[in-house]
Each structure stands twice: as C-alpha cells, then as structure tokens.
Amino acid sequence: MSAKIINLVLEQGTDFQSTFTIYNDNGSKLNLTGYTGKGLIKKSTYSSTSYPFSLTFPNRIGGQVKVSMAKTNTSLIEGGRYLYDVVITSPNDFSTRVVQGSVLVTPGVSIWQIMM
C-alpha cells in the first residue's frame, strides 16, 4: 500500500482535525483494530523541529484515522508551507506510511488578540 497524498490547510490558532479512510490494495477498508499510529508536521524532511498530531481511530473497522491539533499547539506554528505524514503500526509491528502531503499554515489576525 502506498501513501495517499492529501494536502491540508491548517489555520493558525484554531483547533484542527482531519479524518482519513485507509484502504487495502484491493479497495476494501483496512481494519485498524489493534493498530497504533503517529503523525508529524515539519518544515522540511530534515528539520529538527516537529509538531505532533494527536492521532485517534474513530472507526477502526471502517479504516478511519483522525489527526488533530489543539489551538494552543497550532498557534505555535509560524505561517508557511510544511510537510506531514501519518504512519500506522499493525499489531505485529509492521509500520506503513498511509497519508502524506503538504500543510499550508495560514496565519491568523485574531489569534494575537486572543493570546494577549
């Protein structure tokens, strides 16, 4: 299974979430029972700074993975273009990158008023 490319827009200073459905190579939804996962945003592949997503499985049998980030964390990311990926690990410890792409972080105007 190759990673699906999905580009995201994250609005700085707001709560963010996105849900993906993961499919097997034959087109059926991947049963994610027992799986774990992680997802990160980075400015570049080699950047030492990363911003982790919270990752949950709202419908494991239906192949759903949700990434999210609270506004307290999105407010820490400067506006600009970033990269991200989501890696899941099966119960037998096999890791697969399932989603990847770019993240456009759009700076907010109101966020600075809220934070002061």
Image: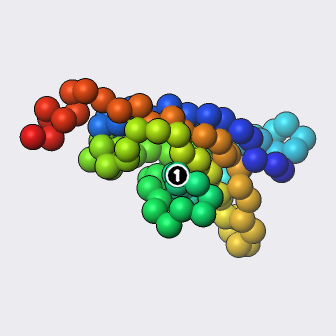
Q: Amino acid at mark 1?
A: Lys
Residue 28 at x, y percent in the picture:
81, 39
Instruction: Give the colour scheme of this rendering.
Output: rainbow
Where does label 1 land, which residue?
A: 43
User: At which x and y percent is residue 22?
Assistant: 71, 42
Residue in view at x 47 percent, y 59 percent: 50
Q: How many marks?
A: 1
Compared across the picture, whether 113 is left or right of 86 comes to left
- For the C terminus, the quadrant is top left
Residue 102 shows in this picture: yes
Per the image, label 1 sits on a secondary structure element best described as: loop
Q: Quadrant of residue 79?
A: top left
Judged from this view, the residue extending furthest toward the top is 109
Q: Is residue 39 above or below residue 21?
A: below
Q: Residues within 10 Å of mark 1 (few under 14, many from 20)?
A: some
Whether residue 89 is situated above or below residue 57 in the rendered picture:
below
Q: Name the residue: 35% across, 32% down.
A: 107
Q: Residue at x 65, y 42 (%)?
A: 101
Left or right of 29, for residue 35? left
Q: Nearer the viewer, residue 79 or 72?
A: 79
State whether residue 45 is above or below residue 5: below
Q: Tell me: 31 left or right of 72.
A: right
- Whether residue 79 is situated above or below residue 3 in the rendered picture: above
- Relative image position of residue 36 (x, y in whole percent): 59, 62
Q: Which residue is found at the position 30% from the left and 29% from the top?
A: 108
| Outermost residue, left side | 116
Locate residue 64, reporting x and y percent: 61, 42
